[in-house]
Image (tube, grey):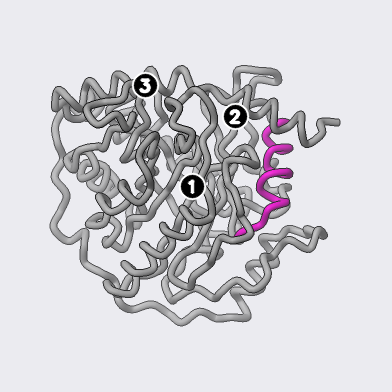
């Protein structure tokens, strides 16, 4: 059996930085040259329609009995006492979780190496997402599937840049293009992901405020590239504290209240314990639904072990699981986990991400 220390050590070793940071360096050059979408979308900027910021104001009230039962269903027979999470608030009307399972494609439009979102032309990418959605509908007919695009809007870099922060903020034109691509599928939602590098979440998050005011746009944050030590991204695994996460939740809560929005979803990536410090101090809000996403890659048993130790045993609210089309195949048995296999996890993940 693999013990906790082995899981942490192996997970850290297996997660690669080199390829991503190489892609980021290429991305940085493209941004500085004002290059727009790569050839998969014909290198043009797609302008969003003007109705994307219209808030939706009418939602059915939360049925507390059904909500509690769905949380029990997600616990999937867990006997640890961790799940469902106790003393969590009921969400505002319009909440996506726990009623739906989100299936998202992750990446960046400037790079084919950073994920499936940027690897394929939009029509092929959406068709592939549809295939994954159908697999999850078959694996769990009792839970509707919510398709999503998860776009890296602030990307950790291998070079410091003019301000020495080792991160590149994507231009609005690229984020606008993702919003428009999302319109190819009805009711698609979008996540904007932040890799702060040597910057801070307090400096980066406000730049995305105008997008997060949109009812279909949500937030992801990546502790892996939060380099509080001052070291370069990729030289080690970064960290976020509960104070960073609470700042994000407070920021989103304010937007929801001021703009009459449905609850926002906050995705936090994690594959080691130290990536999230003081997790018990993370605060929950009716306006924000928080997902701790198992972000490590490797063979199936390693990934399940990582989920068991760093996600199951440190409950916050909801959970997620990331699948890698390439990296999960690097070691035997050379395959990704299937929806049927992931349906055996305790608790069941509410968010599935494909890179």
* Position of 69 relative to 244 (above/below): below
- In the image, taking residue 170 as reference, residue 69 lies left or right, namely right
- To which residue does mark 3 refer? 158
Q: Nearer the viewer, mark 2 or mark 1?
A: 2
Q: Is residue 209 depicted above or below 296 in this figure? A: below
Q: Earlier in the sequence, mark 2 or mark 1?
A: 1
Q: Nearer the viewer, residue 104 or 154?
A: 154
Q: Position of residue 113 (x, y in %)?
A: 39, 22
* Mark 1 lies on residue: 103
Please rate how many residues cluster around mark 2, counting C-alpha atoms within 10 Å: few if below 14, some from 14 to 19, many from 20: many
Q: Which residue is mark 2?
A: 297
Residue at 14 percent of width and 27 percent of height: 34
Q: Is residue 60 magenta?
A: no
- Secondary element at image label 3: loop
Inter-mark Cα distance, 2 to 1: 17 Å
Q: Nearer the viewer, residue 221 or 319?
A: 221
Tell me the residue at 31%/63% (across/down): 215
Q: Tell me, yes or no, whether the two marked residues, 2 and 1, touch with CB atoms within 8 Å.
A: no
Most extreme residue toward the front, as rendered?
Answer: 230
């Amino acid at each position: 059996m693999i013990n906790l220390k082995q899981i942490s050590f192996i997970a850290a070793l297996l997660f690669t930085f080199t390829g991503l940071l190489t892609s980021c360096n290429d991305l940085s050059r493209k941004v500085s040259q004002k290059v727009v979408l790569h050839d998969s979308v014909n290198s043009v900027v797609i302008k969003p329609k003007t109705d994307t910021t219209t808030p939706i104001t009418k939602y059915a009230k939360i049925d507390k009995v059904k909500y509690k039962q769905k949380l029990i269903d997600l616990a999937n027979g867990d006997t640890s006492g961790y799940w469902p999470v106790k003393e969590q608030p009921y969400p505002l009307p319009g909440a996506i979780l726990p009623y739906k399972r989100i299936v998202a494609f992750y990446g960046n439009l400037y790079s084919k190496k950073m994920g499936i979102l940027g690897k394929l032309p939009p029509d092929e990418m959406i068709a592939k997402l549809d295939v994954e959605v159908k697999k999850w509908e078959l694996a769990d007919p009792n839970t509707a599937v919510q398709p999503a695009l998860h776009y890296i809007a602030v990307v950790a870099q291998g070079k410091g840049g003019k301000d020495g922060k080792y991160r590149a903020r994507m231009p609005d034109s690229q984020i606008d293009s993702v919003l428009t691509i999302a319109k190819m599928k009805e009711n698609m939602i979008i996540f904007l992901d932040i890799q702060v590098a040597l910057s801070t979440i307090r400096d980066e998050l406000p730049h995305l405020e105008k997008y997060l005011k949109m009812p279909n746009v949500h937030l992801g944050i990546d502790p892996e590239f939060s380099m509080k030590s001052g070291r370069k991204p990729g030289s080690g695994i970064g960290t976020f504290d509960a104070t960073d996460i609470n700042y994000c939740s407070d920021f989103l809560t304010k937007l929801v209240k001021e703009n009459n929005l449905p609850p926002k979803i906050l995705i936090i990536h994690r594959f080691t314990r130290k990536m999230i410090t003081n997790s018990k101090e993370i605060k929950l809000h009716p306006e924000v639904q928080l997902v701790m996403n198992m972000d490590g890659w490797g063979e199936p048993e390693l990934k399940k072990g990582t989920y068991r130790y760093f996600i199951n045993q440190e409950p916050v609210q909801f959970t997620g699981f990331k699948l890698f089309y390439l990296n999960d195949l690097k070691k035997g048995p050379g395959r990704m986990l299937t929806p049927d296999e992931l349906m055996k996890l305790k608790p069941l993940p509410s968010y599935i991400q494909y890179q």
